[in-house]
Amino acid sequence: MKFEVNKAELLKVLKTLLPITASKFAKAQPVLENFLFETSNGKLSITASDISIKGIAKISHGIDITDDGTMLVNAQKFTSIVETFDKAISIKKEETEIILSENKTKISLPLIQLKYPENILKSKIEYDSEFEINIKDFKEGLNKAFDFRKSITYDILSGVNIKTDNEKLKFCATDGNALAVYSAAIKKPYEEVNFTLSPAVCDLLLKNLANTGANKALIKISKKRVNIRFGNIIIESALLDGIFPKYEGIIAINDKPDKFLTIDKKQLFDCIKKVAAVKENTPSNDAKTAKSSAIRYYITLECGLITKINYSNKLEDYIPAEYGGENISISFNPDYMLKVLKSCNNDRLTLEISTELGPIFVKEENLTALIMPVQGVRR
C-alpha cells in the first residue's frame, strides 16, 4: 500500500472522525481506537467506529495512489503526526511498519497487527426513507435545540428529535423544564419521519457539518439507525430508543396569550449573570442539600413598564420594558432562561405569558422556546 496525499485534505477528515475513536465505547474494544485505511479505484477510504457510531470519509482529490491496500493506524497518534507535516505526505505500508515522509522528513510507525471487526465493515442496512436538507438549516436546527436536551442521562430526552410536520422539518429538545422547537424547510418529495439523534451524533455533526463545503445533507432512516451523508463524509449511527414526548399539546396552550413583556435581551442576560454571582454554591457531596438549593434557585419577574427582578430578596434589579396585560408576577429558574436567551437571535424578546402557573414562551422566526415556571413560590 502506497499513496501520496494532501496534508490539509487528510487532516480535515481525520479530525472529523477522531472523536468516534475516543469514545468510551471504542476504548472498551481497543481495535476501535484505530482508523482503518483502504485504497481502491483511485480513492482513499478511512473508517472509524465505536459500534454505536460509524464514520466513513473518502478522499479522491489531492491524492495519488501507487499501490492499493489496507492498514490500521492509531487514530490519536496518527492525527498528531499528520499535523506536523507541511503539504504533501507520502505514506507507505511495509511488512512491519508504516512510513510517513515529506522531503527529508521520515517517520516510522509499527504496523498494527489487529483485524478490524467484520460486522462493522460488512453491515448492510435497508433504509425505509430518505430526504435532503440544506446544511445551514440542519446545523441551525441542531444548534438551537441541543442546549435544551437532558444532559445527565442517555435516554430519549438526551437527544434531539427530528420529524416532519406540515412541510417543515422540526428539531426539538427538552429536559422537561425547558423546550425549544426549530422549523426548517424540507425539499419535496419526502416521507414522514420521526427519529431522535443521540447527543454524540449531534455533537459530531455540529462540529463538522460546515467543514466539507457541501450545501446539502442526505439523510436515510430505518427503524433503528440513521445514515447522514454530507460532502465526502458519511455518519451512520443507532437512533435513541423510546417515544419522544408529543410537545404540540404544550405549545398549543399558548394559542391565546394575553400578557406580553418585551424586554432587552442583553439587559436580562446581564441581570441573570448578577443572580448567578449572588447565588450560594452548595457542596457537590451534599446531594440532598444541592437538590433543595436547586429548587430554591429562581427569580421572579414583576411585569410592568419597569419590570422588577427579584432573587430571594438578595438581589433586586429593574429593566425598562414594554408590557401589555394585567399585572402578574412569575418565577422561573434563571438557568433555563439563559438557554432561551442564547438560542434567540433578536436583540429584543417578547415573553408571552398566560398565567403564573403556565409556561413562558419566546418566539422568533422558525423558533419557539418555552420554560416552565417554578411552582409554589411565596410572594
Image (cartoon, rainbow, N blue to C red):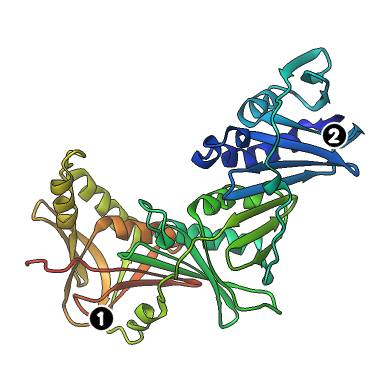
Q: Is residue 129 above or below residue 198?
A: below
Q: Amino acid at mark 2?
A: Gly
Q: Residues within 10 Å of mark 1 (few under 14, many from 20)?
A: many
Q: Name the residue: 88% across, 41% down.
A: 40
Query: Which residue has dot 2 on it?
Result: 69
- SS for dot 1: loop
249 relative to 109 in the view: left or right: left
Disc 1 target residue: 354
What quarter of the picture does the N terminus occupy? top right
Q: Could you say where residue 51 lies in the image, as x and y percent from the top left?
A: 59, 47
- x, y percent for residue 108: 74, 16
Quarter of image, res 94: top right
Marks 2/1 in contact by CB < 8 Å: the verdict is: no
Q: For the point 33% across and 82% down, which residue is it?
A: 254
Which quadrant would the C terminus be assigned to in this image?
A: bottom left
Q: Secondary structure at mark 2?
A: strand
In this rendering, the answer to whether 85 lies above or below 20 is: above
Q: Residue furthest right?
A: 66
Mark 2 or mark 1: name the one nearer the start of the chain: 2
